[in-house]
Image: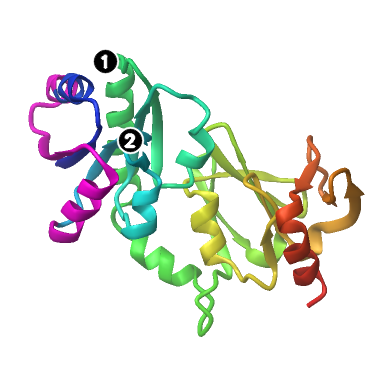
Amino acid sequence: MKVVIIEDEKPAAEKLVKAIQKTSPSIEIAAILNSIKASVDWLQQNPMPDLFFMDIELGDGLSFKIFDKINITSPVIFCTAFDEYWQEAFEHNSIDYLLKPVKQDKLETALNKYDKLKQHFAGNFLQLQQWQQQPGTGHKKRFLVKRGTDYVSIRTEDIAYFYATYKLVCMVDNKSQKFILDQSLADIEKQVDPSQFYRLNRKYLVQLGAIKKIKSFPKSKLQVEVEPATPEDIIISQENAAAFKEWMAQ
Protein backbone atom coordinates (compact mmCIF):
# COMPACT_ATOMS: atom_id res chain seq x y z
CA MET A 1 0.00 0.00 0.00
CA LYS A 2 1.27 3.46 -0.93
CA VAL A 3 0.47 6.47 1.23
CA VAL A 4 1.16 10.18 0.91
CA ILE A 5 1.69 12.39 3.96
CA ILE A 6 0.76 16.06 3.71
CA GLU A 7 2.25 17.81 6.74
CA ASP A 8 4.10 21.11 7.04
CA GLU A 9 5.81 20.40 10.36
CA LYS A 10 8.87 18.20 9.81
CA PRO A 11 8.96 16.69 13.34
CA ALA A 12 5.28 15.76 13.10
CA ALA A 13 5.83 14.18 9.67
CA GLU A 14 8.82 12.17 10.91
CA LYS A 15 6.89 10.99 13.97
CA LEU A 16 3.95 9.93 11.78
CA VAL A 17 6.25 7.99 9.43
CA LYS A 18 7.70 6.05 12.37
CA ALA A 19 4.23 5.32 13.75
CA ILE A 20 2.97 4.11 10.34
CA GLN A 21 6.00 1.87 9.83
CA LYS A 22 5.62 0.49 13.34
CA THR A 23 2.00 -0.39 12.60
CA SER A 24 2.71 -1.91 9.19
CA PRO A 25 6.27 -2.07 7.81
CA SER A 26 4.91 -2.99 4.38
CA ILE A 27 3.35 0.45 3.89
CA GLU A 28 5.31 2.55 1.40
CA ILE A 29 5.55 6.30 1.98
CA ALA A 30 5.27 7.60 -1.59
CA ALA A 31 5.81 11.25 -0.66
CA ILE A 32 5.89 13.73 2.21
CA LEU A 33 4.50 17.08 1.07
CA ASN A 34 4.50 20.29 3.11
CA SER A 35 2.09 22.67 1.33
CA ILE A 36 -0.97 22.95 -0.87
CA LYS A 37 1.21 23.94 -3.83
CA ALA A 38 3.65 21.06 -3.36
CA SER A 39 0.74 18.63 -3.01
CA VAL A 40 -1.00 19.83 -6.16
CA ASP A 41 2.26 19.77 -8.15
CA TRP A 42 3.06 16.23 -6.99
CA LEU A 43 -0.44 14.89 -7.63
CA GLN A 44 -0.45 16.35 -11.14
CA GLN A 45 2.63 14.28 -11.97
CA ASN A 46 2.06 11.07 -10.01
CA PRO A 47 -0.64 8.42 -9.67
CA MET A 48 -3.09 8.66 -6.80
CA PRO A 49 -1.86 6.84 -3.68
CA ASP A 50 -3.98 4.29 -1.82
CA LEU A 51 -4.35 6.54 1.22
CA PHE A 52 -3.55 10.07 2.40
CA PHE A 53 -2.50 11.26 5.85
CA MET A 54 -3.31 14.95 5.75
CA ASP A 55 -2.81 17.85 8.14
CA ILE A 56 -5.43 20.59 7.79
CA GLU A 57 -3.72 23.88 8.60
CA LEU A 58 -0.76 24.20 6.23
CA GLY A 59 1.53 27.17 5.71
CA ASP A 60 -0.30 28.28 2.56
CA GLY A 61 -3.86 27.57 3.68
CA LEU A 62 -6.24 24.76 4.60
CA SER A 63 -5.52 21.44 2.92
CA PHE A 64 -9.18 21.28 1.81
CA LYS A 65 -8.11 23.62 -1.02
CA ILE A 66 -6.21 20.72 -2.57
CA PHE A 67 -9.57 19.12 -3.37
CA ASP A 68 -10.56 22.22 -5.34
CA LYS A 69 -7.58 21.73 -7.66
CA ILE A 70 -7.24 17.95 -7.80
CA ASN A 71 -9.88 15.23 -8.03
CA ILE A 72 -8.89 13.26 -4.94
CA THR A 73 -10.25 9.72 -5.29
CA SER A 74 -8.42 8.11 -2.37
CA PRO A 75 -9.54 8.06 1.28
CA VAL A 76 -7.97 10.47 3.75
CA ILE A 77 -7.02 10.19 7.41
CA PHE A 78 -6.81 13.74 8.72
CA CYS A 79 -4.25 14.44 11.46
CA THR A 80 -4.64 17.82 13.10
CA ALA A 81 -4.27 19.70 16.36
CA PHE A 82 -7.69 21.31 15.91
CA ASP A 83 -11.08 19.67 16.46
CA GLU A 84 -13.26 22.28 14.74
CA TYR A 85 -12.70 20.96 11.21
CA TRP A 86 -14.08 17.45 11.72
CA GLN A 87 -17.34 18.03 9.82
CA GLU A 88 -15.67 19.60 6.80
CA ALA A 89 -13.07 16.83 6.88
CA PHE A 90 -15.78 14.21 6.45
CA GLU A 91 -16.93 16.01 3.33
CA HIS A 92 -13.46 15.50 1.86
CA ASN A 93 -12.95 11.71 1.64
CA SER A 94 -12.16 11.36 5.33
CA ILE A 95 -12.37 7.94 6.95
CA ASP A 96 -10.95 9.13 10.27
CA TYR A 97 -9.99 12.29 12.16
CA LEU A 98 -7.00 11.99 14.50
CA LEU A 99 -6.02 14.71 16.92
CA LYS A 100 -2.35 15.49 17.47
CA PRO A 101 -0.30 14.19 19.07
CA VAL A 102 -1.41 11.08 17.21
CA LYS A 103 -1.50 8.07 19.51
CA GLN A 104 -0.27 4.73 18.24
CA ASP A 105 -3.47 2.88 19.10
CA LYS A 106 -5.61 5.50 17.32
CA LEU A 107 -3.44 5.22 14.23
CA GLU A 108 -3.71 1.45 14.22
CA THR A 109 -7.50 1.68 14.55
CA ALA A 110 -7.66 4.11 11.61
CA LEU A 111 -5.55 1.82 9.41
CA ASN A 112 -7.70 -1.17 10.39
CA LYS A 113 -10.76 0.84 9.38
CA TYR A 114 -9.17 1.50 5.98
CA ASP A 115 -8.55 -2.23 5.51
CA LYS A 116 -12.13 -3.12 6.44
CA LEU A 117 -13.59 -0.48 4.14
CA LYS A 118 -11.38 -1.65 1.29
CA GLN A 119 -12.55 -5.24 1.75
CA HIS A 120 -16.16 -4.18 2.12
CA PHE A 121 -16.26 -2.16 -1.09
CA ALA A 122 -14.25 -4.61 -3.16
CA GLY A 123 -15.91 -7.09 -5.48
CA ASN A 124 -19.15 -5.86 -6.97
CA PHE A 125 -18.91 -2.22 -5.86
CA LEU A 126 -18.77 -0.80 -9.40
CA GLN A 127 -21.65 -3.01 -10.43
CA LEU A 128 -23.70 -1.77 -7.48
CA GLN A 129 -22.92 1.84 -8.38
CA GLN A 130 -24.07 1.35 -11.95
CA TRP A 131 -27.24 -0.39 -10.80
CA GLN A 132 -28.13 2.52 -8.54
CA GLN A 133 -27.81 5.19 -11.26
CA GLN A 134 -30.91 6.58 -12.95
CA PRO A 135 -30.55 5.71 -16.67
CA GLY A 136 -30.01 8.75 -18.85
CA THR A 137 -29.77 11.25 -15.97
CA GLY A 138 -26.72 10.29 -13.94
CA HIS A 139 -28.83 10.71 -10.79
CA LYS A 140 -29.32 7.87 -8.34
CA LYS A 141 -32.69 6.19 -8.32
CA ARG A 142 -31.97 4.18 -5.15
CA PHE A 143 -29.42 3.86 -2.35
CA LEU A 144 -28.14 0.52 -1.15
CA VAL A 145 -27.84 0.68 2.64
CA LYS A 146 -26.95 -1.80 5.33
CA ARG A 147 -29.38 -2.92 8.02
CA GLY A 148 -27.70 -5.32 10.40
CA THR A 149 -26.13 -7.99 8.23
CA ASP A 150 -28.54 -7.36 5.33
CA TYR A 151 -28.62 -4.81 2.53
CA VAL A 152 -31.75 -2.79 1.77
CA SER A 153 -32.53 -0.78 -1.37
CA ILE A 154 -34.17 2.58 -0.61
CA ARG A 155 -35.74 4.48 -3.50
CA THR A 156 -34.53 8.07 -3.76
CA GLU A 157 -38.10 9.38 -3.76
CA ASP A 158 -38.63 7.71 -0.36
CA ILE A 159 -35.74 9.61 1.24
CA ALA A 160 -36.64 12.64 3.37
CA TYR A 161 -33.16 13.98 4.04
CA PHE A 162 -29.49 13.28 4.69
CA TYR A 163 -27.65 14.84 7.59
CA ALA A 164 -24.14 14.92 9.01
CA THR A 165 -23.49 14.20 12.64
CA TYR A 166 -20.23 13.55 14.44
CA LYS A 167 -18.07 11.46 12.09
CA LEU A 168 -21.19 10.03 10.40
CA VAL A 169 -23.62 10.77 7.60
CA CYS A 170 -27.15 9.45 8.07
CA MET A 171 -30.11 9.03 5.76
CA VAL A 172 -33.70 9.33 7.01
CA ASP A 173 -36.58 8.00 4.93
CA ASN A 174 -40.23 9.04 4.92
CA LYS A 175 -41.01 6.46 7.61
CA SER A 176 -38.41 7.95 10.00
CA GLN A 177 -36.06 5.01 9.48
CA LYS A 178 -32.41 6.02 9.84
CA PHE A 179 -29.47 4.47 8.00
CA ILE A 180 -25.75 5.20 8.25
CA LEU A 181 -23.92 5.83 4.97
CA ASP A 182 -20.26 5.51 4.02
CA GLN A 183 -20.26 8.71 1.95
CA SER A 184 -19.93 12.41 2.65
CA LEU A 185 -22.77 14.87 2.15
CA ALA A 186 -20.74 16.49 -0.62
CA ASP A 187 -20.53 13.19 -2.51
CA ILE A 188 -24.23 12.44 -2.02
CA GLU A 189 -25.19 15.92 -3.20
CA LYS A 190 -23.47 15.20 -6.53
CA GLN A 191 -25.44 11.96 -6.98
CA VAL A 192 -29.00 13.15 -6.38
CA ASP A 193 -31.27 15.24 -8.60
CA PRO A 194 -30.67 18.94 -7.77
CA SER A 195 -34.28 19.74 -8.68
CA GLN A 196 -35.41 17.46 -5.83
CA PHE A 197 -32.67 17.82 -3.21
CA TYR A 198 -31.19 20.99 -1.74
CA ARG A 199 -28.20 21.48 0.57
CA LEU A 200 -29.75 23.72 3.24
CA ASN A 201 -26.53 24.12 5.23
CA ARG A 202 -23.40 22.19 6.09
CA LYS A 203 -25.39 19.53 7.94
CA TYR A 204 -28.59 18.93 5.94
CA LEU A 205 -29.41 17.81 2.39
CA VAL A 206 -33.21 17.73 2.13
CA GLN A 207 -35.72 16.48 -0.42
CA LEU A 208 -38.33 18.96 -1.63
CA GLY A 209 -41.25 16.80 -0.51
CA ALA A 210 -39.95 16.66 3.07
CA ILE A 211 -40.10 20.45 3.50
CA LYS A 212 -43.25 21.35 5.47
CA LYS A 213 -42.74 24.95 6.55
CA ILE A 214 -40.36 27.86 5.98
CA LYS A 215 -40.21 30.65 8.56
CA SER A 216 -38.36 33.92 8.81
CA PHE A 217 -35.45 33.92 11.22
CA PRO A 218 -33.44 36.82 12.70
CA LYS A 219 -30.77 38.50 10.55
CA SER A 220 -32.53 37.59 7.27
CA LYS A 221 -32.02 33.87 7.82
CA LEU A 222 -34.65 31.18 7.24
CA GLN A 223 -35.79 28.32 9.42
CA VAL A 224 -36.97 25.16 7.66
CA GLU A 225 -39.20 22.52 9.21
CA VAL A 226 -39.15 19.05 7.70
CA GLU A 227 -41.05 15.82 8.12
CA PRO A 228 -39.91 13.59 9.79
CA ALA A 229 -38.90 16.23 12.31
CA THR A 230 -35.27 16.83 13.26
CA PRO A 231 -34.00 17.17 16.85
CA GLU A 232 -32.50 20.58 16.05
CA ASP A 233 -33.54 23.68 14.12
CA ILE A 234 -32.47 23.79 10.49
CA ILE A 235 -31.27 27.29 9.70
CA ILE A 236 -30.40 28.65 6.26
CA SER A 237 -27.85 31.45 6.25
CA GLN A 238 -28.58 34.92 4.94
CA GLU A 239 -26.17 34.26 2.05
CA ASN A 240 -28.03 31.12 0.98
CA ALA A 241 -31.60 32.28 1.64
CA ALA A 242 -32.23 33.92 -1.74
CA ALA A 243 -30.92 30.92 -3.70
CA PHE A 244 -33.06 28.57 -1.62
CA LYS A 245 -36.23 30.61 -2.23
CA GLU A 246 -35.45 30.64 -5.94
CA TRP A 247 -35.04 26.85 -5.89
CA MET A 248 -38.35 26.45 -4.06
CA ALA A 249 -40.09 28.57 -6.71
CA GLN A 250 -38.97 26.46 -9.66
**Eyeballing the image, is 84 above or below 163?**
above
Residue 80 painted magenta:
no
Q: How dense is the environment of label 2, judged by Cα within 10 Å: few (below 14), some, or many (20 and up)?
A: some
In the displayed structure image, the side of residue 239 where residue 216 appears, left or right: right
Q: Please identify the quadrant where the C terminus is shown.
A: bottom right
Q: Earlier in the sequence, mark 1 or mark 2?
A: 2
How many marks the image carries: the answer is: 2
Q: Which residue occupies 79% across, 35% down?
A: 231
The image quadrant that residue 242 belongs to is: bottom right
Of the pair 102 and 176, the residue shown nearer to us: 102
Q: Looking at the image, can residue 64 be seen?
A: yes
Q: Please identify the quadrant where the N terminus is shown.
A: top left
What range of the chain is rendered magenta? 18-46
In the displayed structure image, the side of residue 113 where residue 201 appears, left or right: right
Residue 47's spot in the image, x, y percent? 15, 57
**Eyeballing the image, is 240 above or below 139?**
above
Q: Which residue occupies 56% across, 60% down?
A: 189
Of the pair 20 and 239, the residue shown nearer to us: 239
**Eyeballing the image, is 71 above or below 176?**
below
Q: Which residue occupies 14% across, 26% down?
A: 24
Residue 164's spot in the image, x, y percent? 60, 41
Mark 1 = which residue? 104
Amino acid residing under circle 1: Gln
Amino acid residing under circle 2: Leu
SS class, disc 2: strand
SS class, disc 1: helix
Does the CB distance between marks 1 and 2 fall below 8 Å? no
The image quadrant that residue 235 belongs to is: top right
Residue 33's spot in the image, x, y percent? 19, 39
The residue furthest front is: 60
Mark 2 = which residue? 58
